Amino acid sequence: MDRRQKKTRTAIFCAFRALLEKKRYDHITVQEIIDEANVGRSTFYAHFETKDSLLNAMCEELFYHIFEDDPCPWVGRDNDLEKKLSHTLWHIRDRKNDLSGILLSDSGELFMRYFKEHLRAMFEMYISGYKNDVPKDFMLNHLVGSFAEAVLWWIREDMKTSPEETAGYFMKMTKIC
Amino acid sequence: MDRRQKKTRTAIFCAFRALLEKKRYDHITVQEIIDEANVGRSTFYAHFETKDSLLNAMCEELFYHIFEDDPCPWVGRDNDLEKKLSHTLWHIRDRKNDLSGILLSDSGELFMRYFKEHLRAMFEMYISGYKNDVPKDFMLNHLVGSFAEAVLWWIREDMKTSPEETAGYFMKMTKIC
DNA sequence: ATTTAACCGAACAACAAGTTCGGTATCGTA
DNA sequence: TACGATACCGAACTTGTTGTTCGGTTAAAT
């Protein structure tokens, strides 16, 4: 990939992130993005079809690193949920700078959607063998929703507690062990 | 309030809801709303400053009925969380027609934000006396997030299970009793 | 050094937001 | 029933956004 392309792409991503911390997604204009990024109008549209495409592309790059870059060292070894969650939190901390701004922004829900999709896949694998009288997808929604909340809390607290401690809080609130 | 105003207001609300089931909030134009509602352009702006104002107004009307219309018959009597939650679910079921479309829509997160605000106030009251080594606001986020997920699941299932049964599922996943 | 490809930016058409205003229809009330 | 108030209508207009086009410029790759 051409150096210029990478430069433009990251400039647009950075500008977009910076703007998201200031205002809501649907109030941001392409004009503002290219001004902030110092990029020509036609260049923007050479990279992304629309503002929505930009959103998608950024989410994919962002969450790829957290969930798919690393082949889950605990899968197949043991089935300790707390360990898995800590592991995930470590990855999230690695991406702190990229993540915290947008997840805490006015439009955080947009990114949360992608985040939850990945979480869902993770928990799905874990609870496949679990048995109680609560419907499977109820459990899944519950775990995904509450863990996502935990991550948000953690970011808001500037990640002062350790990944292990934070995962511990989650386990202490959840009846599944 | 003038009959004509009420008529216009509800026509706009209905149109807005109908459109939300078809497309995302930020892709809906004022033009589409007034076409769907059969209302003049200037009339729309006489009622609402912007599309965002419309969103706010609709949320307020919607969640008012669920959370504030009824003076919480259980407050001060006992402290049974499960009862409180069932009670809330009954109210939600009353508003099923107005709620389900928008909460399941592409822009459901927008409404969820309001919904969670109310849930937060509700849980806050409940856990004020509760003690364990998990931070208070972590607990609050956890409960709000996971109960919101429970409601979404319930709506998606077309509310086939009873409010009591559904609240029971929630309690079975939550370590707080 | 040369070729290839990305970037620039001005100009443009299509469309959306929000305002204004004179005219019409409907409401609440006497 | 009549009358005054007021809500609604809709066309026209300004301003701002989107997405495209194209000829010229700059920088990467080899």
Image: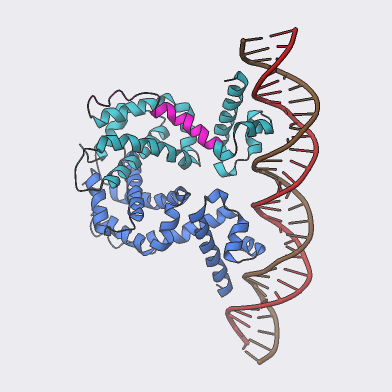
Chain colours: A cyan, B blue, C red, D brown
- Please tell me how many numbered marks the rendered image carries: 0
In this picture, is C10 found above or below A72?
Answer: below
Q: Nearer the viewer, residue D4 or A137?
A: A137
Q: Position of residue A104 (x, y in %)?
A: 46, 37
Image quarter in which the C terminus of chain A is found: top left
Q: Is residue A115 left or right of residue A56?
A: left
Q: Which of the 4 image quarters holds residue B2?
A: bottom right
x 60%, y 31%: residue: A47
Q: Is residue A50 left or right of residue A145?
A: right
Q: Which of the 4 image quarters holds residue B54?
A: bottom right
Is residue B75 visible in this depiction of the protein? no
Q: Position of residue B46 (x, y in %)?
A: 63, 63
Q: Position of residue D22 (x, y in %)?
A: 77, 33
Q: Is residue C10 left or right of residue A81?
A: right
Q: Which residues are magenta?
A: A54-78
Q: Nearer the viewer, residue B177 or A69?
A: A69
Q: Position of residue A70 (x, y in %)?
A: 37, 23
Is residue A71 visible in this depiction of the protein? yes
Q: Is residue D27 left or right of residue A66?
A: right
Image quarter in which the N terminus of chain A is found: top right
Q: Is residue A42 magenta?
A: no
Q: Nearer the viewer, residue A93 or B33?
A: B33
